[in-house]
Amino acid sequence: MKQVNPIPYGRQHITDDDILAVNDVLRSPFLTQGPNIAAFEAAFAAYIGATYAVAIANGTAALHLCTMALGVQPGTKVITTPITFSASANCVRYCGGEVYFADIDPETALLDPKAVRALLEAHPKGTFSGIIPVDFAGYPVDLPAFRQLADEFGLWLIEDACHAPGGSLTTADGKTYRCGDGSLADLAIFSFHPVKHIASGEGGMITTNDENLYKHLLRLRTHGITNKPDEWTELQPGEPERGGWYMQMQELGYNYRLTDMQAALGLSQLSRADQMLARRRQIAARYDEAFAGTAVKTIVPAASAGHAYHLYVIQVEDRKGLYDFLRTKQIFAQVHYIPVHTMPYYRQFGWNWGDFPHAEQYYARCLSLPMYPTLTDKEQQYVIDTVITMIK
Ligand SMILES: *Cc1c(COP(=O)(O)O)cnc(C)c1O
């Protein structure tokens, strides 16, 4: 059992075609907002099954524009999961809103609709404005249940689908929803950080089926400016005639654009998305098989259909022992996530350890094993053998 190369928990895969695609942009007249942006948006919307897609500088900026577009402001209360990357919650704070958490389902580590219902019912109707469920690890969250809550309590939904491009949920009545397809959530967001399914360096995307939100997001991405005449206010008294140069800044937006180099890389990667997802599922199936009947527990049933496997999470009693042991063997497993409500920043709002027992018990035992398409069978076997040596 000898292994020399370090094995990370996630890693990008860049091909010669990817490099050529970026090179082409560097030789073209457009470094930002060139033809690759629109091409990437169209291809991504088609892949996800949504009507519109807006390319954004990164997933965090995408979340920020979503909370802006949905009107979050000081006093707006929004619910999310403690088991996510902190950006899922921070986007509410960027607009001055208040973050509420609800516990996870211990079987899946996903935000539990029952816990969210209990929170909603414990407050007068109208207290909350929205929910941000997360397709944690790539396993699709129960969006039909959240849509029902949203309709019942008058809320919007942002699906944080960063872990789940290509994932899908099939309900008991046989309907299939693709993660981020906009049929249940008002907006969905993705990230193209190198550890995610598709890498563009930094990068993000918002998908939606709502034309008004789509148009608003395009403006917010570029300073709140529009150059579309049908969106302009009428000529003002004293205003000179408008010409080809004219544009209007209508609200306070940001520069959250993606570059054309990044879009070219994302587009080139997207062409291999299905192939890379199939490989992730193959790796997951092999882990499932190796750990069946051992003390290594997984968070979702083996071979879960529709799972996009951004992460492969196991649960073990001696998590720190295993983490440290794997490092000595050059295997760099990771912990996803330290519950957001326990972060010092969120503790100042009154949240604390003890608030969400399922999330905290999950955190105490979770470890993400290496999961990326270029992980070789030999490397994976080394990971499996090393884990099993320690966890008998
Ligand atoms: C990666 C990630 C983000 C943020 O995306 P960036 O592109 O890194 O800003 C948000 N939410 C989740 C669940 C993520 O995994």
Image (cartoon, helix red, strand yellow):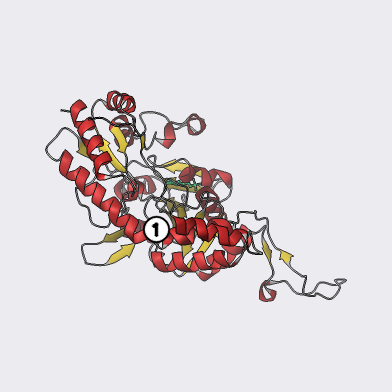
Q: Amino acid at mark 1?
A: Ala
- Count of number-bearing discs: 1
Residue 388, image x, y percentages: 19, 31
Locate residue 359 relative to residue 97 in the image: left or right. Answer: left
Whether residue 353 is visible to the viewer of this picture, yes or no, is yes
Nearest the eye: 64 or 325: 325
Q: Quadrant of the C terminus?
A: top left
- Report which residue position mark 1 lands on: 150
Q: Quadrant of the N terminus?
A: top left
Nearest the eye: 265 or 68: 265
Residue 375, image x, y percentages: 31, 44
The structure residue drawn at horizontal position 40% and vertical position 57%, both measured from the top left corner, is: 153
Locate residue 178 relative to residue 64 in the image: left or right. Answer: left
- Answer few, some or many: residues within 10 Å of disc 1's Cα (few below 14, many 20 plus, some between 14 and 19): many
Residue furthest out toward the left: 293
Locate residue 36 relative to residue 313 in the image: left or right. Answer: right
Q: SS class of the residue under badge 1?
A: helix
Residue at disc 1, CB closer than 8 Å to ligand 1: no
Q: In the figure, 142 relative to 368: above or below?
A: below
Residue 148, image x, y percentages: 34, 60
Residue 207, image x, y percentages: 47, 62
Whether residue 155 is visible to the viewer of this picture, yes or no, is no
The structure residue drawn at horizontal position 65% and vertical position 59%, both measured from the top left corner, is: 222
